[in-house]
Amino acid sequence: MNKRIVLARPAGSSPVPDDFRLEEAAIPSPGPGQVLIRVDHVSLDPYIASTLRGRHMSGGVPVGGVIPGEAVGTVIESRGDGLAVGDRVICRAGWQQFTVADIAPAAVAQGPLSLAAQKITLPDGVSYTSLLGVLGMPGLTAWAGTVKMLKPIPGDTFVVSAATGPVGATAGQLAKRMGARVVGIAGGPEKCAFAVETLGFDACIDHRDADWVANLAAACPDSIDCYYDGVGGRILEGVLGQLAVGARIVLVGMMEQYKAPAPLPGPNLVPIIKFRATVEGLVVYDHWADLPNFRRRVAPLVRDGQVIVREERVAGLEAAPDALIRLMDGGNFGKMVLDL
Amino acid sequence: MNKRIVLARPAGSSPVPDDFRLEEAAIPSPGPGQVLIRVDHVSLDPYIASTLRGRHMSGGVPVGGVIPGEAVGTVIESRGDGLAVGDRVICRAGWQQFTVADIAPAAVAQGPLSLAAQKITLPDGVSYTSLLGVLGMPGLTAWAGTVKMLKPIPGDTFVVSAATGPVGATAGQLAKRMGARVVGIAGGPEKCAFAVETLGFDACIDHRDADWVANLAAACPDSIDCYYDGVGGRILEGVLGQLAVGARIVLVGMMEQYKAPAPLPGPNLVPIIKFRATVEGLVVYDHWADLPNFRRRVAPLVRDGQVIVREERVAGLEAAPDALIRLMDGGNFGKMVLDL
């Protein structure tokens, strides 16, 4: 029989034991072009909780459906070309002992959401389970955010949250190799000691400490140039106050939002991740050198009525306080100018 | 005498009349290298309210200090080279009838915070006061965010908040000339009608309408590619939910934060502006094609112990629910792998 765990009921904010049901079913039979796989190891990742609530871009899990998850396993029956009995494969088997899967074409890189089984070519000297972690989706997530997006340069201060998880640990170690000073944020002294002593981070801050923001500041005397964040919420807030000018931030997860029973107050930043958005802060002082160029382009448009800005004129110094008060309430209509 | 308005007491969240005091002082005398200026027009801008609370990067205003602001005026006495009686100048005179200022070197572009007086070379056919608005700091702010940062391309949907203010109106009109479909967000039907009928925006949404988020969605059927935001808070939240994949956002102001009596809940995003930070959302699925390259680089580091990820192994399918629940609470320590 095939033991498997299915969703017992629509899940709430954080998963609880009653959301899951262990059941047994017949071991499925592969069709033509398919293989039967014995699942050896299943990856447990935070995104799974979101799928149980139907809130993840990889799709939701129906009640009665097998809990999803990447897995490595062994082919025990093959009815197609490309995979033979005994081959090790990676597939999205989920929480069950056996699964049937299509055989992925060898020449085509299968995306992460493919349900097809891909033959594993294990790099020398690494474990099978590393393909679920440091050399799998979590590791690729760290690689993309660190090497391709944040691109720390020597001397940068690089902060990473969830620092001992597979994403954070990999991101921090890659940043360290790129020449950054790396400061982790993690929960508890044991994780922080591991980040420094084993992962080689320069420091690691325990966010359960009431003084963690001050401790982060002490560990980042030159402010924070790069921040790799998988947590959001209060951790993100604490980091934002300590940025260096020109800081780069990658948001890869919002753990605090995912497990909140109700929407957290304040702007929900999850769409920045979902839509792969870029948010930049603008301070006009940085662009002052462009003033002559700007005026040369825009003045003719203003002269010709092609760029219009309405003015609201206010007469006399005595009228200024009320005008500013109205401006702050949106009670003005156009550019406010005080005529003396 | 020189009438002027000074800060009467430390200001609170939003300015109120009692924060200001009108007083008279002797007209100051210029020293060598200085001019005496009769102030003709003063610019009223939202940042002034932040200076009164000591919360603006241009500096705070002490109690008794003149309320700051860009101004245009006329030289009525000169004790230096480069400016003569009758010359029109721009300077940071603030809320007063007369001021003394150094003469800015003509060859050097003066920054926005300079207190020196710069001679105005008025472009053909534009008004003096436009140098405080559409051709001044607000216009440059719009130019930088739109032309240099967001760079809308033909067909983009470009949304701008505070759409009838000098920054938003200029940003939207520049985006329109760059080929974007432009949708404004403003407060009240009169402003919205002006944005469409006079500024030529494709639509403008009244954020005072309870259905404004749905109305914005209806006006942006292809989602939002660019967002120019000077407001933050609930307006930003409403826009974030409607982004297109790959959207670009420029944050230039947080009007909702500036006037709030207490810090608003949720992460305070003002530091993104203050530190000119860049925030990017990462979805690993976008980087799947890089998996072979990533593995080729990182696998040798894993093999040699130069990149370490700790695993937490959990035995048996029955243990999976509890393991996922612990993972969501941060109770795990390392990459969680379920062994079957």
Image: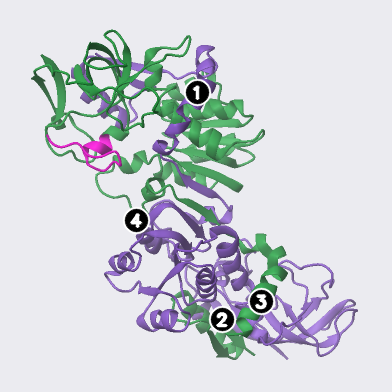
Chain colours: A green, B purple
Question: For the residue labelled by badge 1, is the local secondary structure a helix, a strand or a loop?
Answer: helix
Residue nearest the viewer, comparing B239 with A206: B239
Q: Which chain hosts label 1?
A: A
Using a 10 Å C-alpha cutoff, classify the residue at mark 2 as few (fewer than 14 neighbours), some (14 to 19) or many (20 or more): some
Residue holding disc 3: B70
Residue holding disc 1: A195
Using a 10 Å C-alpha cutoff, classify the residue at mark 3 as few (fewer than 14 neighbours), some (14 to 19) or many (20 or more): many
Query: Between disc 1 and disc 2, whose residue precedes?
Result: 1
Give the amino acid type for the residue marked by disc 3 in the picture: Glu
Which mark is drawn over residue B241? Answer: 4
Give the amino acid type for the residue marked by disc 1 in the picture: Ala
Distance in Å between CA atoms under marks 1 and 4: 36 Å
Distance in Å between CA atoms under marks 3 and 2: 25 Å
Callout count: 4
Mark 3 against mark 2, which lies toward the viewer?
2
Give the amino acid type for the residue marked by disc 2 in the picture: Gln
